[in-house]
Image: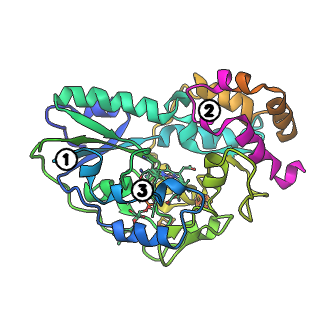
């Protein structure tokens, strides 16, 4: 990783930055692809992608008025993801699975954690900025693509050739140019591989179009829907109860890193809220987990999981996820 305007790579790494890129281009290269996807209804229940906020994604100027440049970061959670995978192999594990990002950042909601980290970088840069971090009407994979941070995989993940795809994307949108060198855009390295398509339990990936159907993706059902809803076919027997990493687990660009010993194991994992989540969701027998969740009051749930990714989905949302599992009927 290169230094960023006098900020050392060591400092950036200490914040979990796997790589960063820079672009002065406010226009996504794939807006038409996104619009077509939405027009075909592939956003399913995610209405914020098709309402008035859709067109805001055409130009970064709608999010940062007077936009001149963006510094884009990949925040890695490969280390915690590897620790989680190792945990799944132990006798302690109840064999249920959750999205790796939810157990990274010490179990804290990445929106809060990464915002703080980017604010530290922003203040070192000494510039005025606004954030783009998931909830903003920005095509963030495209922003990372045009900053040279990766290519769009067939599973639609932004994949970095050296750092894989277990990275969250965050950006500082600036009203001035920093005049930094822009990386070359990364070429597609999926080749003939179809591993993500082959593994997806709900058939959510369209290989040719290189997109996913949000209605069929386990992540939509299990994270974004808070009340009773129909589960996508294939969900009932999958081990995933909150989000899904399957199409990344099998990706050779993640596996290669693991095989080559490039991922440093997090020694002290899980800690903080991550430990609370592991102990509650990933240790008790699935039927006990369901009972424990039912017994917890809504307030008790919020107290226990405040500041984590589970807070938003909530007790009812998680009970809905468990209710659709065939092994719990
Ligand atoms: C809506 C959303 C979802 C939805 C829909 C996902 C989807 N694929 O659309 C659901 C709930 C299913 C979801 C799931 C997940 N998500 Co999500 N999600 C988003 C969100 C908020 C918007 C994405 C969006 O606009 N979708 C519309 C589709 C059409 O766009 P897209 O998926 O970005 O795909 C673009 C590229 O694929 C590109 N493209 C594809 N092929 C080609 C080919 C060419 C030639 C070109 C030019 C372009 C191109 O065009 C598309 C439009 O830009 C973003 C945050 C953000 N503001 O961007 C996070 C985001 C995409 N999610 C993220 C994550 C981590 C996940 C999960 C891994 C979480 C989990 N473990 O459960 C899964 C992964 C599922 C998957 N395989 O995509 C990260 C991805 C990081 C990365 N390295 O890619 C993001 C960027 C959040 C963040 N700030 O880090 N997510
Ligand atoms: S996250 Fe899971 S359900 Fe969604 S596309 Fe990937 S493998 Fe399929
Ligand atoms: S699993 Fe294969 S096809 Fe899918 S994103 Fe990774 S390299 Fe591309």
CA distance for labels 2 and 3? 27 Å
Residue 116 placement: quadrant: top left
Which of marks 1 and 3 precedes in the sequence? Answer: 3
Mark linked to residue 52: 3
Circle nearer the N terminus (1, 2): 1
Q: Which secondary structure lies at badge 2?
A: helix
Which region is colored magenta? 302-329
**Residue at label 1?**
67
Where residue 149 appears, x then y in whole percent?
Answer: 31, 54
Secondary structure of the residue carrying numbered label 3: loop
Could you tell me how far apart the alpha carbons at marks 1 and 2 are, in whole angstroms? 33 Å
Most prominent secondary structure in the magenta stretch? helix
Quarter assignment of residue 217: bottom right
Q: Is residue 200 above or below residue 126?
A: below
User: What residue is drawn where x is 66% and y is 53%?
Assistant: 221
Q: Is mark 3 within 8 Å of ligand 1?
A: no
Mark 1 vs mark 2, foreground winner is 1
In-image side of 32 versus 178 (left or right): right
Which residue position is annotated with label 2? 311
Q: Is residue 118 magenta?
A: no
Residue in the picture at 55% in, 25% down? 268
Which percent across, then down, holds residue 226? 67, 44
Specify the quarter for ligand 2.
Answer: bottom right
Badge 1 local density, few (<14 within 10 Å), some, or many (20+)?
many
Q: Residues within 10 Å of mark 3 (few under 14, many from 20)?
A: few
State the image coordinates of residue 98 (x, y, percent, origin top left).
65, 44
Q: Quadrant of residue 286?
A: top right
């Amino acid at each position: 990783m290169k230094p960023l305007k006098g900020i050392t790579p060591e400092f950036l790494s200490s914040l979990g930055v796997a790589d960063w890129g820079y672009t002065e281009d406010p226009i996504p290269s794939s807006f038409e692809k996104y619009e077509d996807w939405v027009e075909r209804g592939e956003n399913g229940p995610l209405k914020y992608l098709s309402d008035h906020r859709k067109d805001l994604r055409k130009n970064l100027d709608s999010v940062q008025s007077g936009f001149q440049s963006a510094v884009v970061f990949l925040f890695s959670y490969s280390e915690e993801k590897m620790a989680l995978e190792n945990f799944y192999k132990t006798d302690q594990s109840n064999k249920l699975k959750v999205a790796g990002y939810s157990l990274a950042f010490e179990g804290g909601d990445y929106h809060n954690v990464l915002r703080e980290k980017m604010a530290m970088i922003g203040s070192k840069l000494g510039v005025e900025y606004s954030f783009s971090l998931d909830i903003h009407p920005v095509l963030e994979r495209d922003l990372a693509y045009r900053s040279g941070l990766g290519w769009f995989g067939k599973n639609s993940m932004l994949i970095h050739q050296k750092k894989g795809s277990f990275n969250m994307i965050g950006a500082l949108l600036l009203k001035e140019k920093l005049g930094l060198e822009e990386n070359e855009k990364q070429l597609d390295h999926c080749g003939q591989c179809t591993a993500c398509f082959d593994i997806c339990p709900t058939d959510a990936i369209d290989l040719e179009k290189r997109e996913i159907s949000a209605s069929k993706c386990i992540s939509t059902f299990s994270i974004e829907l808070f009340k009773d809803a129909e589960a996508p076919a294939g969900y009932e027997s999958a081990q995933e109860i909150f989000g899904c990493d399957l199409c990344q687990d099998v990706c050779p660009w993640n596996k290669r890193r693991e095989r080559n010993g490039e991922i440093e194991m997090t020694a002290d994992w899980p800690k903080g809220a991550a430990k609370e989540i592991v102990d509650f969701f990933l240790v008790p027998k699935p039927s006990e987990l369901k009972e424990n969740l039912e017994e917890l009051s809504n307030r008790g749930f919020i107290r226990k999981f405040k500041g984590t990714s589970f807070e938003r989905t909530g007790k009812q949302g998680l009970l809905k996820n468990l209710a659709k599992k065939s092994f719990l009927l």
